Image: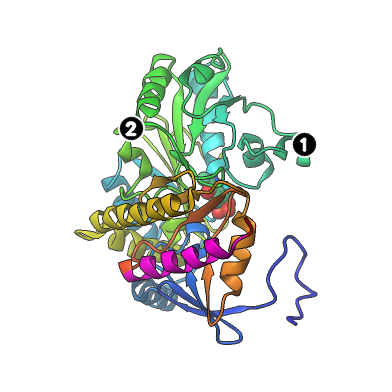
Amino acid sequence: MIDAHSIMYITNRPDITMVSGEGSWLTDNEGKRYLDFMQGWAVNCLGHSNPGMIAALDKQARKVMNPSPAFYNEPMIELADLLTANSCFDKVFFANSGAEANEGAIKLARKWGKLHKNKAFEIITFDHSFHGRTIATMSASGKPGWDTMFAPQVPGFPKAHLNDIASVEALINENTVAVMLEPVQGEGGVIPAEIGFMQDLRALTKKHNILLIVDEVQSGCGRTGKLFAHQLFDVEPDIMTLGKGIGGGVPLSALLCTDAVASFEPGDQGGTYNGNPLMCAVGISVITQLTAPGFLTDVMAKGEYLKSKLLQLSAEFGFDGERGEGLLRALIMNRDIGPSIVDAARNMTPQGLLINSPRPNLLRFMPALNVSTLEIDLMIETLRTLIAQAPK
Ligand SMILES: *Cc1c(COP(=O)(O)O)cnc(C)c1O
Protein backbone atom coordinates (compact mmCIF):
# COMPACT_ATOMS: atom_id res chain seq x y z
CA MET A 1 0.00 0.00 0.00
CA ILE A 2 1.15 3.53 -0.76
CA ASP A 3 1.24 5.61 2.45
CA ALA A 4 -0.26 8.91 1.29
CA HIS A 5 -1.98 9.91 4.52
CA SER A 6 -0.58 13.46 4.29
CA ILE A 7 -2.14 14.05 0.89
CA MET A 8 -5.46 15.88 1.16
CA TYR A 9 -8.27 13.65 -0.03
CA ILE A 10 -9.85 15.06 -3.19
CA THR A 11 -10.28 12.02 -5.42
CA ASN A 12 -9.80 8.26 -5.53
CA ARG A 13 -6.37 7.37 -6.86
CA PRO A 14 -5.04 3.90 -7.66
CA ASP A 15 -2.54 2.41 -5.22
CA ILE A 16 0.57 3.26 -7.24
CA THR A 17 2.92 6.17 -7.77
CA MET A 18 4.10 7.20 -11.20
CA VAL A 19 7.88 7.51 -11.26
CA SER A 20 9.03 8.11 -14.83
CA GLY A 21 7.87 8.68 -18.36
CA GLU A 22 9.10 8.75 -21.92
CA GLY A 23 7.05 9.71 -24.96
CA SER A 24 3.72 7.87 -24.82
CA TRP A 25 4.76 5.68 -21.89
CA LEU A 26 4.61 6.06 -18.10
CA THR A 27 6.23 3.73 -15.57
CA ASP A 28 4.99 3.17 -12.00
CA ASN A 29 6.82 2.34 -8.75
CA GLU A 30 6.62 -1.39 -9.50
CA GLY A 31 8.14 -1.02 -12.95
CA LYS A 32 4.85 -1.58 -14.78
CA ARG A 33 4.49 0.44 -18.00
CA TYR A 34 1.37 2.22 -19.21
CA LEU A 35 0.53 3.40 -22.72
CA ASP A 36 -0.63 6.93 -21.97
CA PHE A 37 -3.56 8.21 -24.03
CA MET A 38 -4.47 10.77 -21.35
CA GLN A 39 -1.17 12.61 -21.10
CA GLY A 40 -2.08 14.50 -17.95
CA TRP A 41 -5.48 15.48 -19.42
CA ALA A 42 -4.27 16.62 -22.85
CA VAL A 43 -1.38 18.50 -21.25
CA ASN A 44 1.79 16.73 -22.38
CA CYS A 45 1.40 17.56 -26.06
CA LEU A 46 4.94 16.36 -26.79
CA GLY A 47 4.71 13.29 -24.54
CA HIS A 48 6.71 12.59 -21.40
CA SER A 49 10.27 13.89 -20.92
CA ASN A 50 10.49 15.71 -24.25
CA PRO A 51 14.20 16.40 -24.91
CA GLY A 52 13.58 19.94 -26.21
CA MET A 53 11.64 20.87 -23.10
CA ILE A 54 14.30 19.35 -20.83
CA ALA A 55 17.05 21.34 -22.58
CA ALA A 56 15.01 24.55 -22.33
CA LEU A 57 14.40 24.02 -18.60
CA ASP A 58 18.03 23.24 -17.91
CA LYS A 59 19.38 26.19 -19.89
CA GLN A 60 16.96 28.72 -18.39
CA ALA A 61 17.33 27.35 -14.83
CA ARG A 62 21.03 28.09 -14.99
CA LYS A 63 20.42 31.66 -16.23
CA VAL A 64 17.60 32.98 -14.05
CA MET A 65 14.42 31.41 -12.69
CA ASN A 66 12.57 34.36 -11.23
CA PRO A 67 13.89 37.89 -11.68
CA SER A 68 10.46 39.20 -10.47
CA PRO A 69 7.31 39.89 -12.43
CA ALA A 70 8.13 43.60 -12.07
CA PHE A 71 10.72 43.23 -14.85
CA TYR A 72 10.62 42.06 -18.45
CA ASN A 73 12.56 38.88 -19.13
CA GLU A 74 13.76 37.39 -22.43
CA PRO A 75 11.65 34.18 -22.56
CA MET A 76 8.43 36.05 -21.73
CA ILE A 77 8.96 38.43 -24.66
CA GLU A 78 10.07 35.73 -27.07
CA LEU A 79 7.08 33.48 -26.28
CA ALA A 80 4.60 36.37 -26.55
CA ASP A 81 6.09 37.27 -29.96
CA LEU A 82 5.78 33.65 -31.11
CA LEU A 83 2.12 33.50 -30.08
CA THR A 84 1.13 36.81 -31.67
CA ALA A 85 3.08 36.03 -34.88
CA ASN A 86 1.10 32.78 -35.22
CA SER A 87 -2.38 34.11 -34.35
CA CYS A 88 -4.78 37.02 -34.85
CA PHE A 89 -3.95 38.41 -31.38
CA ASP A 90 -1.66 41.30 -30.44
CA LYS A 91 -1.13 41.06 -26.68
CA VAL A 92 -0.36 38.23 -24.26
CA PHE A 93 -0.51 37.87 -20.46
CA PHE A 94 1.03 34.71 -18.98
CA ALA A 95 -0.37 32.89 -15.96
CA ASN A 96 -0.08 29.45 -14.36
CA SER A 97 -3.28 27.52 -14.99
CA GLY A 98 -6.22 27.42 -17.35
CA ALA A 99 -8.60 28.63 -14.68
CA GLU A 100 -6.36 31.59 -13.96
CA ALA A 101 -6.14 32.51 -17.66
CA ASN A 102 -9.94 32.33 -17.85
CA GLU A 103 -10.29 34.51 -14.73
CA GLY A 104 -8.11 36.99 -16.60
CA ALA A 105 -10.36 36.77 -19.67
CA ILE A 106 -13.45 37.41 -17.52
CA LYS A 107 -11.78 40.41 -15.87
CA LEU A 108 -10.60 41.77 -19.22
CA ALA A 109 -14.10 41.49 -20.74
CA ARG A 110 -15.67 43.19 -17.71
CA LYS A 111 -13.03 45.94 -17.86
CA TRP A 112 -13.70 46.48 -21.55
CA GLY A 113 -17.45 46.59 -20.81
CA LYS A 114 -16.89 49.17 -18.10
CA LEU A 115 -14.91 51.38 -20.47
CA HIS A 116 -16.75 50.87 -23.74
CA LYS A 117 -20.19 49.38 -23.10
CA ASN A 118 -21.78 51.25 -20.25
CA LYS A 119 -20.59 48.77 -17.59
CA ALA A 120 -21.98 45.71 -19.36
CA PHE A 121 -20.65 42.62 -17.52
CA GLU A 122 -22.64 39.53 -18.46
CA ILE A 123 -20.75 36.79 -20.28
CA ILE A 124 -22.89 34.20 -22.05
CA THR A 125 -21.44 30.71 -21.59
CA PHE A 126 -22.73 27.22 -22.46
CA ASP A 127 -24.36 24.14 -20.95
CA HIS A 128 -21.78 21.41 -20.28
CA SER A 129 -18.88 23.83 -20.70
CA PHE A 130 -15.82 23.63 -18.44
CA HIS A 131 -13.71 26.69 -17.66
CA GLY A 132 -11.93 25.79 -14.42
CA ARG A 133 -12.28 25.30 -10.68
CA THR A 134 -12.03 28.78 -9.20
CA ILE A 135 -15.34 30.22 -8.01
CA ALA A 136 -15.75 32.52 -11.04
CA THR A 137 -14.73 29.90 -13.60
CA MET A 138 -17.00 27.32 -11.92
CA SER A 139 -19.80 29.86 -12.27
CA ALA A 140 -18.93 30.28 -15.94
CA SER A 141 -18.94 26.50 -16.41
CA GLY A 142 -22.09 24.66 -17.41
CA LYS A 143 -21.30 21.44 -15.57
CA PRO A 144 -24.47 20.00 -14.01
CA GLY A 145 -24.46 20.45 -10.22
CA TRP A 146 -21.77 23.10 -10.13
CA ASP A 147 -24.33 25.87 -9.68
CA THR A 148 -25.07 24.72 -6.13
CA MET A 149 -21.80 23.07 -5.08
CA PHE A 150 -20.17 26.14 -3.54
CA ALA A 151 -23.15 28.48 -3.70
CA PRO A 152 -23.57 31.35 -4.09
CA GLN A 153 -22.06 31.56 -7.56
CA VAL A 154 -20.50 34.62 -9.13
CA PRO A 155 -23.40 36.23 -11.04
CA GLY A 156 -23.33 37.17 -14.71
CA PHE A 157 -22.93 33.90 -16.62
CA PRO A 158 -26.23 33.03 -18.36
CA LYS A 159 -26.07 29.68 -20.18
CA ALA A 160 -26.89 29.03 -23.85
CA HIS A 161 -26.87 25.73 -25.78
CA LEU A 162 -23.85 24.88 -27.92
CA ASN A 163 -24.56 24.90 -31.67
CA ASP A 164 -27.87 26.72 -31.14
CA ILE A 165 -27.41 30.34 -32.22
CA ALA A 166 -30.98 31.30 -31.31
CA SER A 167 -30.30 30.29 -27.69
CA VAL A 168 -27.39 32.76 -27.63
CA GLU A 169 -29.32 35.55 -29.30
CA ALA A 170 -32.17 35.15 -26.80
CA LEU A 171 -29.79 35.91 -23.89
CA ILE A 172 -28.27 39.10 -25.34
CA ASN A 173 -29.34 42.28 -23.55
CA GLU A 174 -27.81 45.66 -22.65
CA ASN A 175 -25.70 43.99 -19.90
CA THR A 176 -24.06 41.49 -22.26
CA VAL A 177 -20.35 42.06 -22.78
CA ALA A 178 -19.14 38.76 -24.24
CA VAL A 179 -19.80 35.18 -25.31
CA MET A 180 -17.29 32.60 -24.08
CA LEU A 181 -16.94 29.03 -25.32
CA GLU A 182 -14.65 26.09 -25.91
CA PRO A 183 -14.32 25.51 -29.69
CA VAL A 184 -14.40 21.81 -28.79
CA GLN A 185 -16.01 21.12 -25.41
CA GLY A 186 -13.52 18.83 -23.68
CA GLU A 187 -14.73 17.80 -20.23
CA GLY A 188 -18.31 17.99 -21.48
CA GLY A 189 -17.62 14.96 -23.69
CA VAL A 190 -15.58 16.13 -26.72
CA ILE A 191 -18.33 18.06 -28.49
CA PRO A 192 -17.05 20.24 -31.34
CA ALA A 193 -18.75 23.50 -32.20
CA GLU A 194 -20.15 23.41 -35.73
CA ILE A 195 -18.50 25.64 -38.32
CA GLY A 196 -21.77 27.38 -39.21
CA PHE A 197 -22.47 28.02 -35.54
CA MET A 198 -19.03 29.53 -34.92
CA GLN A 199 -19.34 31.78 -37.97
CA ASP A 200 -22.85 32.86 -36.98
CA LEU A 201 -21.61 33.51 -33.45
CA ARG A 202 -18.84 35.76 -34.75
CA ALA A 203 -21.32 37.67 -36.90
CA LEU A 204 -23.82 37.95 -34.03
CA THR A 205 -21.24 39.19 -31.53
CA LYS A 206 -19.94 41.73 -34.06
CA LYS A 207 -23.47 42.94 -34.75
CA HIS A 208 -24.09 43.56 -31.04
CA ASN A 209 -20.56 44.86 -30.40
CA ILE A 210 -19.82 42.16 -27.83
CA LEU A 211 -16.62 40.17 -27.42
CA LEU A 212 -16.01 36.59 -28.54
CA ILE A 213 -13.83 34.66 -26.07
CA VAL A 214 -12.49 31.22 -26.95
CA ASP A 215 -11.28 28.98 -24.13
CA GLU A 216 -8.63 26.90 -25.91
CA VAL A 217 -7.08 25.55 -22.73
CA GLN A 218 -7.77 21.99 -23.93
CA SER A 219 -8.36 22.42 -27.68
CA GLY A 220 -5.52 24.85 -28.42
CA CYS A 221 -1.81 24.30 -29.07
CA GLY A 222 -2.04 21.81 -31.92
CA ARG A 223 -4.56 19.44 -30.30
CA THR A 224 -7.04 19.73 -33.19
CA GLY A 225 -4.41 19.71 -35.92
CA LYS A 226 -4.48 23.52 -36.17
CA LEU A 227 -2.23 25.54 -33.89
CA PHE A 228 -5.42 27.07 -32.42
CA ALA A 229 -8.83 25.40 -32.62
CA HIS A 230 -10.75 28.50 -33.77
CA GLN A 231 -8.62 28.42 -36.93
CA LEU A 232 -10.66 25.35 -37.94
CA PHE A 233 -13.67 27.64 -38.25
CA ASP A 234 -12.03 30.57 -39.99
CA VAL A 235 -13.11 33.08 -37.33
CA GLU A 236 -11.06 35.64 -35.44
CA PRO A 237 -12.08 35.93 -31.76
CA ASP A 238 -11.27 38.94 -29.55
CA ILE A 239 -9.86 36.98 -26.63
CA MET A 240 -8.31 33.51 -26.35
CA THR A 241 -7.05 31.54 -23.37
CA LEU A 242 -4.43 28.80 -23.53
CA GLY A 243 -3.31 26.33 -20.86
CA LYS A 244 -2.51 22.64 -20.71
CA GLY A 245 -0.57 22.06 -23.99
CA ILE A 246 1.22 25.43 -24.01
CA GLY A 247 3.41 24.25 -21.13
CA GLY A 248 3.65 20.67 -22.36
CA GLY A 249 3.40 19.53 -18.72
CA VAL A 250 4.64 22.52 -16.71
CA PRO A 251 2.29 25.10 -15.19
CA LEU A 252 1.92 27.77 -17.85
CA SER A 253 -1.15 29.43 -19.34
CA ALA A 254 -1.86 32.52 -21.40
CA LEU A 255 -4.50 35.16 -22.00
CA LEU A 256 -4.38 36.70 -25.48
CA CYS A 257 -6.36 39.55 -26.97
CA THR A 258 -6.44 42.05 -29.78
CA ASP A 259 -5.14 45.60 -29.39
CA ALA A 260 -8.72 46.88 -29.41
CA VAL A 261 -9.56 44.87 -26.28
CA ALA A 262 -6.31 45.24 -24.30
CA SER A 263 -7.61 47.67 -21.68
CA PHE A 264 -5.98 46.67 -18.39
CA GLU A 265 -4.39 49.49 -16.43
CA PRO A 266 -1.72 49.12 -13.74
CA GLY A 267 -3.29 47.41 -10.71
CA ASP A 268 -5.93 45.53 -12.69
CA GLN A 269 -4.01 42.33 -13.39
CA GLY A 270 -0.89 40.58 -12.15
CA GLY A 271 0.32 37.49 -10.33
CA THR A 272 3.57 36.41 -8.69
CA TYR A 273 4.52 34.00 -11.47
CA ASN A 274 3.18 35.86 -14.50
CA GLY A 275 5.70 35.59 -17.31
CA ASN A 276 7.98 33.37 -15.23
CA PRO A 277 11.05 32.82 -17.46
CA LEU A 278 11.53 29.15 -16.54
CA MET A 279 8.00 28.29 -17.67
CA CYS A 280 8.08 30.62 -20.68
CA ALA A 281 11.34 29.01 -21.85
CA VAL A 282 9.49 25.68 -21.92
CA GLY A 283 6.59 27.33 -23.76
CA ILE A 284 9.00 28.54 -26.46
CA SER A 285 10.29 25.01 -26.93
CA VAL A 286 6.73 23.65 -27.14
CA ILE A 287 5.41 26.22 -29.63
CA THR A 288 8.58 25.97 -31.74
CA GLN A 289 8.15 22.19 -32.00
CA LEU A 290 4.42 22.48 -32.77
CA THR A 291 5.05 24.98 -35.55
CA ALA A 292 7.96 23.06 -37.13
CA PRO A 293 7.24 22.24 -40.80
CA GLY A 294 4.95 19.23 -41.14
CA PHE A 295 4.19 18.76 -37.44
CA LEU A 296 0.54 19.90 -37.49
CA THR A 297 -0.14 18.15 -40.83
CA ASP A 298 1.04 15.01 -39.11
CA VAL A 299 -1.29 15.62 -36.13
CA MET A 300 -4.18 16.03 -38.57
CA ALA A 301 -3.22 12.77 -40.35
CA LYS A 302 -2.92 10.85 -37.08
CA GLY A 303 -6.25 12.30 -35.95
CA GLU A 304 -7.85 10.93 -39.13
CA TYR A 305 -6.13 7.59 -38.55
CA LEU A 306 -7.40 7.38 -34.96
CA LYS A 307 -10.85 8.38 -36.18
CA SER A 308 -10.94 5.60 -38.77
CA LYS A 309 -9.84 3.02 -36.20
CA LEU A 310 -12.44 4.20 -33.68
CA LEU A 311 -15.17 4.05 -36.34
CA GLN A 312 -14.08 0.49 -37.12
CA LEU A 313 -14.36 -0.44 -33.42
CA SER A 314 -17.72 1.30 -33.22
CA ALA A 315 -19.04 -0.71 -36.18
CA GLU A 316 -17.71 -3.99 -34.73
CA PHE A 317 -19.46 -3.46 -31.40
CA GLY A 318 -22.58 -1.70 -32.62
CA PHE A 319 -21.64 1.59 -30.91
CA ASP A 320 -22.74 5.09 -31.85
CA GLY A 321 -19.62 6.28 -33.66
CA GLU A 322 -17.02 8.78 -32.56
CA ARG A 323 -16.45 12.53 -32.58
CA GLY A 324 -13.75 15.13 -32.04
CA GLU A 325 -11.08 17.07 -33.89
CA GLY A 326 -7.46 16.11 -34.49
CA LEU A 327 -6.11 14.15 -31.53
CA LEU A 328 -8.94 15.05 -29.15
CA ARG A 329 -11.49 12.32 -29.81
CA ALA A 330 -14.18 10.28 -28.10
CA LEU A 331 -15.70 6.88 -28.80
CA ILE A 332 -19.46 6.92 -28.22
CA MET A 333 -20.54 3.58 -26.79
CA ASN A 334 -24.07 2.23 -26.50
CA ARG A 335 -23.98 1.68 -22.73
CA ASP A 336 -22.38 3.11 -19.58
CA ILE A 337 -19.24 0.97 -19.48
CA GLY A 338 -16.72 3.85 -19.67
CA PRO A 339 -15.56 3.88 -16.02
CA SER A 340 -15.20 0.08 -15.85
CA ILE A 341 -13.17 0.03 -19.08
CA VAL A 342 -10.91 2.81 -17.78
CA ASP A 343 -10.16 0.78 -14.63
CA ALA A 344 -9.70 -2.49 -16.50
CA ALA A 345 -7.38 -0.76 -19.00
CA ARG A 346 -5.15 0.60 -16.24
CA ASN A 347 -5.10 -2.73 -14.41
CA MET A 348 -4.13 -4.81 -17.45
CA THR A 349 -0.87 -6.74 -17.22
CA PRO A 350 1.93 -6.75 -18.13
CA GLN A 351 1.20 -3.30 -19.62
CA GLY A 352 -1.58 -0.92 -18.70
CA LEU A 353 -3.45 1.58 -20.86
CA LEU A 354 -4.45 5.04 -19.66
CA ILE A 355 -7.67 6.46 -21.10
CA ASN A 356 -10.47 8.59 -19.67
CA SER A 357 -14.25 8.54 -19.53
CA PRO A 358 -15.70 12.06 -19.32
CA ARG A 359 -19.23 10.63 -19.49
CA PRO A 360 -20.17 7.03 -18.62
CA ASN A 361 -20.92 6.12 -22.26
CA LEU A 362 -17.80 7.82 -23.65
CA LEU A 363 -14.10 7.09 -23.82
CA ARG A 364 -11.83 10.08 -24.47
CA PHE A 365 -8.44 9.95 -26.20
CA MET A 366 -5.89 12.75 -25.89
CA PRO A 367 -2.52 11.18 -26.69
CA ALA A 368 0.75 13.04 -27.16
CA LEU A 369 0.63 14.86 -30.50
CA ASN A 370 3.77 12.97 -31.52
CA VAL A 371 2.17 9.58 -30.78
CA SER A 372 3.09 6.95 -33.40
CA THR A 373 0.62 5.02 -35.54
CA LEU A 374 2.03 1.84 -33.97
CA GLU A 375 1.04 3.18 -30.56
CA ILE A 376 -2.43 4.03 -31.90
CA ASP A 377 -2.70 0.47 -33.23
CA LEU A 378 -1.62 -0.96 -29.87
CA MET A 379 -4.18 1.20 -28.05
CA ILE A 380 -6.96 0.07 -30.42
CA GLU A 381 -6.02 -3.63 -30.07
CA THR A 382 -6.03 -3.30 -26.27
CA LEU A 383 -9.35 -1.52 -26.36
CA ARG A 384 -10.88 -4.18 -28.60
CA THR A 385 -9.99 -6.84 -26.00
CA LEU A 386 -11.33 -4.72 -23.15
CA ILE A 387 -14.64 -3.93 -24.85
CA ALA A 388 -15.14 -7.62 -25.71
CA GLN A 389 -14.69 -8.43 -21.99
CA ALA A 390 -16.86 -5.54 -20.72
CA PRO A 391 -20.24 -6.19 -19.04
CA LYS A 392 -22.99 -6.64 -21.64
C1 LIG B 1 -8.62 22.02 -18.07
C2 LIG B 1 -9.44 23.14 -18.54
C3 LIG B 1 -9.50 24.35 -17.81
C4 LIG B 1 -8.86 24.53 -16.47
O1 LIG B 1 -7.47 24.47 -16.53
P1 LIG B 1 -6.64 24.30 -15.18
O2 LIG B 1 -5.21 24.41 -15.61
O3 LIG B 1 -7.00 22.96 -14.61
O4 LIG B 1 -7.04 25.40 -14.28
C5 LIG B 1 -10.21 25.39 -18.37
N1 LIG B 1 -10.84 25.27 -19.55
C6 LIG B 1 -10.80 24.13 -20.27
C7 LIG B 1 -11.47 24.07 -21.59
C8 LIG B 1 -10.11 23.01 -19.78
O5 LIG B 1 -10.10 21.87 -20.47
Q: Nearer the viewer, residue 20 or 350?
A: 350
Mark closer to the chain start, 1 or 2: 1
Q: Residue at x 66, y 41 (%)?
A: 138
Q: Which residues are magenta?
A: 374-390
> Does residue 286 lie above or below 82 as drawn?
below
Q: Provide residue 103's location: percent of width, then percent of height.
A: 58, 41
Q: Provide residue 341's location: percent of width, then percent of height.
A: 59, 61
Magenta span has 68?
A: no
How many neighbours does mark 2 have within 10 angstroms: few (below 14), some (14-19), or many (20 or more)?
some
Which residue of the protein is positioned furthest toward the left in this rendering? 293
Instruction: Give the quadrant of the C terminus.
Output: bottom right
Can residue 267 be spotted in the picture? no
Q: Element under label 2? A: loop
State the mark number for residue 148.
Answer: 1
> Where is mark 2, residue-wise?
236
Can residue 226 be spotted in the picture? yes
How many neighbours does mark 1 have within 10 angstroms: few (below 14), some (14-19), or many (20 or more)?
few
- Label 1 is placed on what type of residue? Thr
User: Number of numbered discs present?
Assistant: 2
Q: Provide residue 172's location: percent of width, then percent of height.
A: 54, 16
> Does residue 81 lie above or below 374 as drawn?
above
Q: Residue at x 75, y 76 (%)?
A: 4
Q: Provide residue 350's location: percent of width, then percent of height.
A: 53, 82
> Does residue 16 lie above or below 142 as drawn?
below
| Residues marked 1 and 2 touching at CB (< 8 Å) | no
Q: Residue at x 55, y 87 (%)?
A: 31
The answer to which quarter of the image holds residue 205 is top left
Q: Nearer the viewer, residue 268 or 208?
A: 208
- Label 2 is placed on what type of residue? Glu
Please identify the dominant SS of the magenta region. Answer: helix
